[in-house]
Amino acid sequence: MLAGLIFATEDADDRMGVLAATLPFGGLTLIEFQARLLAAAGATQIILIVARMTPELLGAISRIGRRGVSVDAVRTAAEALEKLHPLARVLVVADGVVTTGDVVQAIALMPHDTLLVTDEGDPHYERVGADTAWAGLALLDGKRVAEVAALPRDYDFQSTLLRVAAQGGADHVHLDSHMAVNHSIERSAQALARRGNGMVAALVAKPLRWADRYLLAPLVRFALPPLMARTVPTLGLIAASGAVAIGGFFTILSGHPAIGMGITCLAIVFATVASAIAWVRDESGLAQFADHAKPGMAALAALLVGYGAARPAGLILAVAAVIAAALLERAADPALQRRWWASPAAYPAVLFVVLLLGQPLLALAAAGLYAAGTLAAAIEGFRQKP
């Protein structure tokens, strides 16, 4: 079992009375970002070490709990020990750490007690040797927390835990130079604001299917930082996506299917960005709505192309393509997906390309065959699954 231990005791350098852990960080608070990294690394329990409770910290704790992990806030090592599972290994995050999921996961996979160290002279890094400083991440056995709990309560928990781990012979893993660019300890609101949006954009998952991975994901990563920095509302993006989609539908009905399908593709991009921002902001309802809107836009656009093409052949091809795509989404096993598989974002792209040739029936046939071929592969993979 892996548990996360996050320290949130220091005030911000440039905001009196505000905890550094609750400073804004790419639409989140820093402590929420840290908790997400721990959860992604496999932590099922997160313990926050706090000096005092603030309204911002209470709100962050509530939002972290919505992610399905157990969250507790304590003040001392003894209280933390009471909350920890007896067999838990503890992934420690120092106060103010900004890092990436790759670094956290690399530490989480270490077989023994491990301290992430660096040779840099950042004043926020605590020294663990003449030329070595702790970079703010560690993987420790739960007994190290018990050793700190046995010491006087007036000892600083974070520093004492570091000393106990170092004296206990914890392995030292040096921070790679290419990872050090995105790793630091920050307690300044301005510094966190500069780094936050790009770091949160990096949290957006890289889907497997080609259209989502190579078309949508890069656009989301490009658009997310400026939108987060300007605090663009999620509902506004969803409304913009709907307005663009309606424009695309009317364009298709007016006899310009290629242009209309291109506009529909743009609407799907807006919906994807809205879903990503909603996910970052813990707006699960809006994220689900935006995710469900994408296949709806693609299906309606295909049906309108079929309606405007030679009837009834166009409608038959469009309905067949929509049915095959819907069955695929219900039958697809995420563990069996392949890069070439179709997705709600792939169909409008395929339709758009073929519609540029002025062949709506051929476009619908191509999209339908693509969906049917992917569905057949999904069913065959399911049959062969042990």
Image: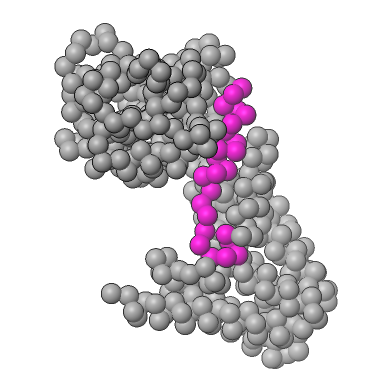
Work out which residue is located at the far front of the displayed protein and give it.
131
* Dominant secondary structure, magenta: helix
What residue sits 66% from the left and 52% below the top?
A: 219
The x and y percentages for residue 66 are 40, 42
| Camera sees residue 259 | yes
What residue sits 79% from the left and 75% below the top?
A: 356
Q: In which quarter of the image is the N terminus?
A: top left
Query: Seen in the image, is 27 located left or right of residue 384?
Result: right
Name the one closer to the observer, 335 or 114.
114
The x and y percentages for residue 88 are 22, 37
The x and y percentages for residue 215 are 64, 60
In the rendered image of this protein, does residue 109 appear above or below residue 182?
below
Q: Which quadrant of the figure has residue 50?
A: top left
Q: Which quadrant of the figure has residue 297?
A: bottom right
In the rendered image of this protein, does residue 298 appear above or below residue 115?
below
The x and y percentages for residue 100 are 48, 38
Q: Quadrant of the C terminus?
A: bottom left
Query: Seen in the image, is 89 located left or right of residue 236?
Result: left
Magenta stretch holds residue 62:
no
Which stretch is magenta?
190-213
> Which colour style is shown?
one colour
What residue sits 61% from the left and 60% below the top?
A: 214
In the rendered image of this protein, does residue 280 appear above or below residue 303?
above
